[in-house]
Amino acid sequence: TFQTIHYTWKKIYSIKLNSGKGFIFKAQMEAPLSPKESGKFITENSKDVFIENKGVREVAELLCEKAATKEFSIEGWKSLHELNPQKMDEAALNWVFAVSTLNFSFWSEREDAKCLVKYKDKTYSGYWALCAAFNRALDEGIPITSASYYATMTLEQLKHVLRSDTNVPMPLLEERHQVLTETGTILLEKFGGSFLNCLKKSEHSAQKLLQIVVENFPAFRDEAVFMGKRVALYKRAQILVADTWSLVASKDDLYFHDISCITMFADYRIPQALVHLGAMRYSDDLMKKLKEGVLFQSGEQLEVEIRGCSIWCVELIRDIMLELLAKKGQDLTDEVNAVLIDYYLWDYARDHRREMADIPIHRVRCIYY
Ligand SMILES: *[C@@H]1O[C@H](CO)[C@@H](O)[C@H](O)[C@H]1NC(C)=O
């Protein structure tokens, strides 16, 4: 059946990323719902994850107070994170592309055994350890953000670049190697080795850039089958568009005319924050599983519910924020979008880890987030 074919495809795909078979299966399928449509469809059919309107409103109110502050702007996002590239040029775009290709699965099994990377007197963990490792490599003269280098780099070379300062390595090193070399090869063959060429082809449309990425780079195709429908979550692909946006947009020029088509990035941190803030609720069954530390499979029903409902929840928060701001006479349709809400909630989740400890993250090991 459809479900099995897709599942097989996912399996083949996650085992062997270059498998040509994946494309045959894919061609037989209808186009997936967009992340926004997927979020709505998943929420309407969800059995273990629910959106709480009262909580949605409260989060919207909280965020409205923040909307005017620096934290809640692309400039703020950039300046609050010193490892991000600070100025826009071709090298910065290629940095964002390469980092976002490997932007997945940083959580550690144990709180006291983490992969850590020291860089310029600071020690980083999680996603920031990846950024630190990239910057460390660049300082050592390893061109880790150049497709011509990483398309053919060996696993040993990548292990060296991503080495940890503890005895816990970064998770999924072999998968990272496979994804990076595959993506680099495609960037070289189809786009002259530079992400700038993808951006040029997108003609100032975030939607189009997203399409270019998911159509050309299989490792960004974060899709699943939910209740017989093909759904797309596109976590890394959308972040790639958003991070590109934060590089190329400025106060007077948004660059993309349609950035609000990008939804939040469904990972494991934002759902936790949404549940903590009361905007989303898990069934008792699901909560029990999370507390037991069950390892979910990428694409299984519960996992898709958690991610899909988070997307729709953030869309609802955004709608109410715009409504509240409009009442105050402020039209911020362009300024308030899911990207900024996501950035804000992600930092919130990081800063409030302790208070949220009673809501475990859902554990999945996959290349999509
Ligand atoms: C990587 O993922 C994190 C968290 O989801 C996000 O905040 C960050 O912007 C991403 N970076 C890139 C370069 O994709």
Image (spheres, helix red, strand yellow):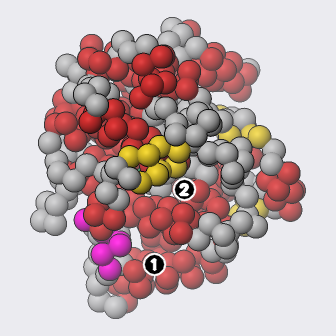
Seen at 45% across and 71% down, the residue is 319
Quadrant assignment for the C terminus = top right
Q: Main secondary structure of the magenta part?
A: helix
Q: Residue 167 placed where, x, y %?
A: 62, 35
Q: Is residue 113 visible?
A: yes
Tell me the tag on residue 311. 2
- Label 2: which secondary element: helix
Tell me the tag on residue 63. 1
118 or 338, nearer to the observer: 118
Seen at 66% across and 20% down, the residue is 11
Amino acid carrying mark 1 in the image = Leu
Q: Is residue 301 visible?
A: no
- Label 1: which secondary element: helix
Relative to 266, say whether 115 is above or below: above
Q: Nearer the viewer, mark 1 or mark 2?
A: 1
Relative to 261, say whether 279 is above or below: below
Q: Residue 219 placed where, x, y %?
A: 48, 27
Q: Is residue 178 left or right of residue 202?
A: right
190 or 76, nearer to the observer: 76
Q: Closer to the N terminus: mark 1 or mark 2?
A: 1
133 or 199, nearer to the observer: 133
Q: Is residue 316 left or right of residue 199?
A: right
Amino acid carrying mark 2 in the image = Ile
**Where are the magenta residues, as a range?**
69-75
Q: Residue 236 placed where, x, y %?
A: 45, 41
- Tell me where residue 180 sits by quadrant: top left
